[in-house]
Amino acid sequence: MGSSESERTEAHLHVDCSQPPARTWQRKFDDEGKKVATFSMSMNDLMTMVPFIAKMLRLYVQESAKGQASVYDPFRKWMDNCYRGVPLGALGSGSIGRSYRGYFQHFQIFPRMFEEKPILANQFSAFVSRPGGKSYSTVLSAPKADVLKGIDRAGIGSWDWKLKEKNCTYNGLFPRSWTVYDGEPDPEIKITCRQISPFIPHNYKESSFPVAVFTFTVQNSGSTPADVTLLFTWANSVGGKSELTGNHTNSRMRARDGVHGVLLHHRTADGHPPVTFAIASQETGGVRVTCCPSFAMGPSVPGGEQFTAKDMWEEAKNRGAFGGAPRASASSRPGSSIGAAVAAATTVPAGGMRAVSFALSWSCPEVKFPAGRTYHRRYTKFLGLDRDAAAEQLAHDALLGEISKDHWSVKTSARLRFLKAFLCLHE
């Protein structure tokens, strides 16, 4: 990299992540979207589709007879996903969708298989407190009432689901998105979350990495400092029934370079290969990161000492951080599920601004197809086949900006090359 090129890259480092580009796909959180009609084709359209429909039905019968999942199930009831935003993921690594209303949905980590329903424990949340005892808290997403219906009030139903939708705006420009929470949860706080996945033109190495970075910019327009804690929670789940099959575990990441996080080891079901997720954040001079390695989604078991989703929320709300003593992470029990959380706390001065970044990565090295063939995903060529090591390395290096072809080196030139590749997407 020449000197002039390095200077241009350095200039890019000062791009304001809190400011979406002028031209984006934009939606307010309270936008109802365009509902999909069950039957919207004309008779002429249907007639031209008859050969295709017959072919798909024949394929469905053949694959069902073999006990295989069909490419298309004509009898499946599909969700009306008119709230979809920019997804997370990279080339050949699977994807995780995200709604323009802030929640994660449409998990597609395995070939031909996906889970449409949102996993409601997968959330970002904000807690704000000011001198004089003023405090505010909310989950930073707005699922529809029918999605929240029936959730356990002793679990994630105890969280503060009180985001004011009219104050929130989503901006999408693949592979990035910006979600602006103006006056949420504190009327004098503006939070902007920039989401980005490494989908880089002419770069087939980093573009295969299953990782995403969320950079939160917190602006305080008030006359007093604000103590802000941003919380990232994630369920040990890929959607579907495997969440409740039991024997899933979580563990702390090895803390290094200020990066703290949790690994979620998921066993899956129906013959699918295991998956490891990693959630992490980086400590800086003004940001303190703490972790809750495991919490139970449901209520406490009589006679047990489970740390529940309600306990986790109350600790983050009251203390703005998690206790330093590591909690033992027992395997989940059949019929129940577990999650993990990472909290990043900072003080935003009056009229000031602070930035906090989180990373999400996942590692599922094997790809199994119905015909019986098994392949390894492209990213394993660079990171190996160890699920846990790959997920941890991806989250760590994405936060530090060290993704480079020189074996994840910390050389300045490699770091600039990675940042240039990401930040050139702003142009």
Image (tube, rainbow, N blue to C red):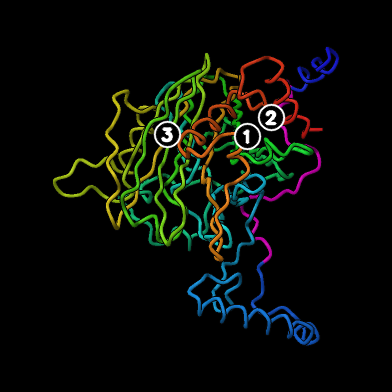
Residue on which disc 2 sits:
17
User: Which residue occupies the foreground of this view, 70 or 137?
Assistant: 70
x and y, in percent, of residue 343 in the image? 44, 30
Q: Secondary structure at mark 1?
A: strand
Q: Is residue 173 visible?
A: yes
10 Å neighbourhood of mark 2: few (<14), some, or many (≥20)? some
Q: CA distance from mark 3 to mark 2?
A: 25 Å
Q: Would you place residue 109 above or below residue 370 in this image?
A: above
Relative to 359, is 345 above or below?
Answer: above
Residue to which mark 3 is pinned: 262
Which residue in the rendered view is the most extreme toward the front? 373
Q: Which residue is mark 1?
A: 192
* Local crowd size for mark 3, using a 10 Å CA cut-off: few (<14), some (14–19), many (≥20): many
* Residue 234 falls left or right of residue 423: left
Which of pointers 3 and 2 indicates the residue nearer the eye?
Answer: 3
Q: Are marks 2 and 1 in contact (CB under 8 Å)?
A: yes
